[in-house]
Image (cartoon, rainbow, N blue to C red):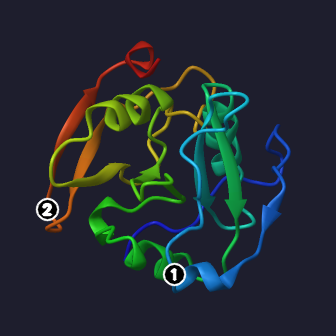
Amino acid sequence: AGVTACSQGEDAKTKAPETKNNDSLVTQKADTTSKADTTSGKIHLAVFKNATCHCCVGWIDHMNENGFATAVHEPKDMSAIKDNYGIAPENQSCHTAVSPDGDVFEGHVPAKFVKRFLKEKPVGAIGLAVPAMPIGTPGMEIEDKFTPYKIVLLKKDGSSEVYADIKSVEEQF
């Protein structure tokens, strides 16, 4: 089983953005109808998270501060969302974001790499993942601690490979 919940407590510094509890999204793909906000140029992402996960809010803030516009959904069954988008258990994390084109970004993927992926559009790929919840990733900041991690390229055939090997905080931005 993959990681589907955040372990941070209620004392998170950020306030959750407006959310929708839309369980119909479990059985259908996200309704993200435009690629960018025509007035601001922001890239839209539908973000699926548990209502009690505060590290997801930190990641959402990071994305919004880096040129994205997020619509947050809090379905009751995150496992169904991950299954629906083809995210293998070993690549799962606490939240799932989906672009208007159906690209999937699982977990605490830095905005820099989401933008790179959207620009490159690797053939045969469905998205990127940061499995589990490494300390020091956007939204998982704890003091000055950092755990090196890998960003994984998720492929349509269910396989994956390393997209980026992040060895320092600075490489994320």
In the picture, the quarter occupied by the N terminus is bottom left
Cα distance between the residues tagged 2 and 1: 23 Å
Mark 2 lies on a secondary structure that is loop
Residue designated by label 1 = 28
Choose between 100 and 137: the one closer to the eye.
100
Q: Residue at x 78, y 68 (%)?
A: 20
Q: Quadrant of residue 41?
A: top right
Q: Determine whether, in the image, residue 19 is placed left or right of residue 157.
A: right
Is residue 53 visible in this depiction of the protein?
A: no
Residue 125 % position (x, y): 22, 52
Res. 159 mark: 2
Up the image or down, 56 lies above or below 112; here it is below
Judged from the image, the secondary structure of the residue bearing numbered disc 1 is loop
Q: Residue at x 43, y 54 (%)?
A: 101
Please identify, in this view, whether the residue under mark 2 or under mark 1 is nearer the observer.
Answer: 1
In the depicted structure, whether residue 25 falls above or below residue 147: below
